[in-house]
Amino acid sequence: MELRLISKKNEQDKKIISCKNLVIGDGSLVVIAGPCSVESREQIFKTAEFVKGQGANVLRGGAYKPRTSPYSFQGLGEEGLKLLREAGDTFQLPVISEIMDTREVELINGYVDILQIGSRNMQNYSLLKEVGRLKKPVLLKRGMAASLEDWLMAAEYIASEGNDNIILCERGIKTFESYTRNTLDLSAVPLIKSMSALPIIVDPSHGTGLRSLILPMSKASIAAGADGVMVEVHPIPEEALSDGFQSLNFREFKDLMEKIKPLHQYLNQ
Amino acid sequence: MELRLISKKNEQDKKIISCKNLVIGDGSLVVIAGPCSVESREQIFKTAEFVKGQGANVLRGGAYKPRTSPYSFQGLGEEGLKLLREAGDTFQLPVISEIMDTREVELINGYVDILQIGSRNMQNYSLLKEVGRLKKPVLLKRGMAASLEDWLMAAEYIASEGNDNIILCERGIKTFESYTRNTLDLSAVPLIKSMSALPIIVDPSHGTGLRSLILPMSKASIAAGADGVMVEVHPIPEEALSDGFQSLNFREFKDLMEKIKPLHQYLNQ
Amino acid sequence: MELRLISKKNEQDKKIISCKNLVIGDGSLVVIAGPCSVESREQIFKTAEFVKGQGANVLRGGAYKPRTSPYSFQGLGEEGLKLLREAGDTFQLPVISEIMDTREVELINGYVDILQIGSRNMQNYSLLKEVGRLKKPVLLKRGMAASLEDWLMAAEYIASEGNDNIILCERGIKTFESYTRNTLDLSAVPLIKSMSALPIIVDPSHGTGLRSLILPMSKASIAAGADGVMVEVHPIPEEALSDGFQSLNFREFKDLMEKIKPLHQYLNQ
Amino acid sequence: MELRLISKKNEQDKKIISCKNLVIGDGSLVVIAGPCSVESREQIFKTAEFVKGQGANVLRGGAYKPRTSPYSFQGLGEEGLKLLREAGDTFQLPVISEIMDTREVELINGYVDILQIGSRNMQNYSLLKEVGRLKKPVLLKRGMAASLEDWLMAAEYIASEGNDNIILCERGIKTFESYTRNTLDLSAVPLIKSMSALPIIVDPSHGTGLRSLILPMSKASIAAGADGVMVEVHPIPEEALSDGFQSLNFREFKDLMEKIKPLHQYLNQ
């Protein structure tokens, strides 16, 4: 594997990424929280307010959604981005949203603080190069069948265009086990950290597809050395237009934060 | 799975696709052959002449290549498309090439007869929708971790925009077996044919990654009911700029055609 | 991989196995047919008579069944072996049955002509060594997660004890695809044949778990170069005590034989 | 899935297993440590003394080894069991060793305190039933391609014969990712705990196959809720007759214990 720009040069080598007031990769805990999709002003504002109150650092919310079926809810588009931006500004949270099309880079870049490349587009090299021409942080999710090498080389694509503000995100791989939506590969966390200077976080919502596993797998992620987690939170998961079964409600998110913040502190003292 | 447009309505339902003089899906054998990448005028012309002489129906040749590393040969771009088009016209072969970016649809559409969506972009929904707005045949490769449902829904995305001239292409899935580059899932052929009216072909070059397996797996594909095969052919595979290890040389391609044409005839008599 | 005893010494090297009047590995077609489990005298006799009439060469029938649940039907045990033996003798068919326990080797050896090691016991090395001390042919199924190397080394275990009368049987591997019970890896057929002198057959019943796929995948197996197939046949699959959903009824088996015998002849003329 | 004997009857239901002075499943931390194979008196005694000193609760050591190749070191057999027993008695550690053959149950039962069923024999139902007739604790490793259902049903086999003193052990599953020997599926820990009352531990040595991952994945396992870990420790891993690349040396084991004991305490306070 020929890593040139994102490799770890020495034991101490760490890429520190700044995003507004937030610093990622310096040992602090990043918690990205919010709904799978932005559905309404009320939904995103209520969620933003709550997750901010519990200590989340970044607000997530999909506007352009990659759905398996063309007949499923596809997101609110630019209207969703506007609502996300407003909610982020109101509650002082940087915002992240997924980008799926090279033609939308400029538009989405105008609204978000971190650009997300989803699993399905991890090897959409045109898109990787396009976000590589920006300066803004990019969160690069692992593809469902991507080896560590495939994944790091995808990051190298972004870096090769000039942008090495890359946050990797493990979100599970496809295996024969069908109890969980995907199999969360936590060994990727220390392995990536040994090969690359980039920060890495974990998405236990997509990684397991089961609400009940988000808390234990978030704790495990942090214990494995992850820089943070990305979790889906919705005011009423049962009524979510997408992925409700893997979203936490407010009470569950509060519980999560009460467990993982001190755990992270304990592990990094 | 909610298939609306590409489902099989009854036992006899078959989508017949016309592409210049070629008909796909009517029971005849489609053989798409050519190099992984267009490398030079000489290379593509020699290959086109040879494969045409052996009975191939479509000329393949990559111009925009999805390579795992940004530092690998990325294809000749538009120059490659021009050479491919010329070679196709000279030897009366429709041509196919891969498209990776929504912004390149118009350009590539101007040169090719069939648009290819590769494995890595099988769930690049923006791209699927964009080629769905054309009338031209689209060859949709299965993603490396795509279930049959994921794959058929990707085809449904294309069809939902108005274009149901879709040829599916099985090209192997990722499994624990590392002897082969991928594991060719031939059961997908009869399964897809029971669920959808679309034609399906097999790519044993990518499906196995081993030159020696192309002949036996091509025969197996045809015996399983595939409408054809897509194979990589190069004048001197050892000198190919990409994928030489899974490309046939001319003698091997001649041998392949001498075996699969009569086999197909025997099976469909 | 260190293959000593079962490796292919040269291009022509083929292990020919004799079993009563049957010869395996000489280019002729082996068809092993019969029910998943021996259930009654009537069932096994009717099946034996029918499959013999259609040209099957070996009668299969489980007596000791490896079932996922301890509460499922576990087979008739020795009574099943007796019935299988009688049916085989009556219709002049060699018989095969699975062995799961080193302590039962002597007993089962007294009844069958070919000993089967199932997928779940492919790395039960004590059992492999034990059947290696016999002279009788052993059919070794590939484990559900066994790489080609794991599988060939398991065969080497048998051979290392003195018995190289080994027939390999591809029966599908576990992958993320859940439409089929397993993913039949037909590329294993030519690959194994390039590495080892042993004959290899394919079990499309377990390999796909779907009755409708048995015919197309049997044809594909033979086209890929397999020495034969092993299929489940039951007088009334809907009433089978195990695996009915992947068993052919008599009419379907007749149809299968009418297709694969001439195909094999065509391919080997 | 029809779990009768090992299912979780209510939220508080926990199977507590006693083994000499050790209690497993009550919330305390179990650490099983020792070499892959017992190689000599000096090796096992030195290891036993050291791991005991660091707080390990159980001494592991293979005597009958399931090796992929028949030409690899197969273990010392009964001599290995004797040395293991002596070392355990000398340093007051219960001992565990793997059993692979129904005929060896009585012999091995005479030496060890916990019987281990390895991955390759997880669906060796004869063996499961045989250890089910004992009263002694059984550690049941997950098969490399075993779904949670397959695994729990294997435990049910043991319990159905009367022995529900079962400790489950997650040790990685086979996936396309080849950087690690297996992919450790830590989501299995909370999932199993929600379905069954049985305790579950994790083996990060086999689960990753990389020494450097043992510490982070042990921490992650405990954070995910595991009852303990099983790790390979060897005085000089570089000279181990088996699996040295995934064994900790003494210094590394000391470091592991210094990290995981307080972490477990922190998480369970």
Image (cartoon, coloured by chain):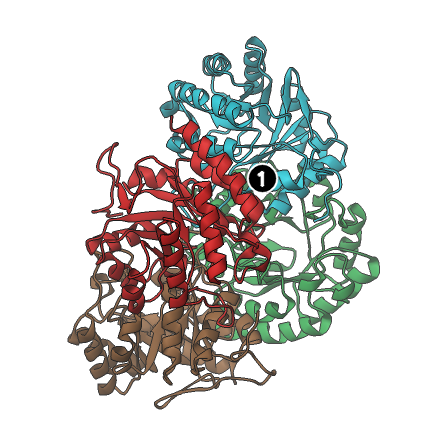
Chain colours: A green, B cyan, C red, D brown
Task: Tell whether B258 sits left or right of D252.
Answer: right
The kind of residue tagged 1 is Pro
Tell me if residue A36 comes above or below residue D140 in the rendering: above
Asked whether B127 or A22 is in front, the reply is B127
Neighbours of disc 1 within 10 Å: few (<14), some (14-19), many (20+): many
Q: Position of residue B61 (x, y in %)?
A: 53, 23
Tell me the residue at 77%/32% (across/down): B162
Task: Tell whether D129 sits left or right of C204.
Answer: left
Tell me the residue at 59%/49% (across/down): A119
Q: Position of residue A241 (x, y in %)?
A: 77, 57
Question: Residue most toward the front?
Answer: C90
Q: Which chain's residue wears label 1?
A: B
Q: Position of residue D69 (x, y in %)?
A: 26, 55
Q: Position of residue D156 (x, y in %)?
A: 48, 75
Asked whether D141 or A35 is in front, the reply is D141
Tell me if residue A250 comes above or below residue A22 in the rendering: below
Tell me the residue at 64%/21% (across/down): B23
Tell me if residue D20 comes above or below residue B111 in the rendering: below
Q: How many badges with numbers are in the image?
A: 1
Dot 1 corresponds to which residue? B190
Asked whether B140 or C5 is in front, the reply is C5
Can the viewer see residue B174?
Answer: yes
Asked whether C153 or A101 is in front, the reply is C153
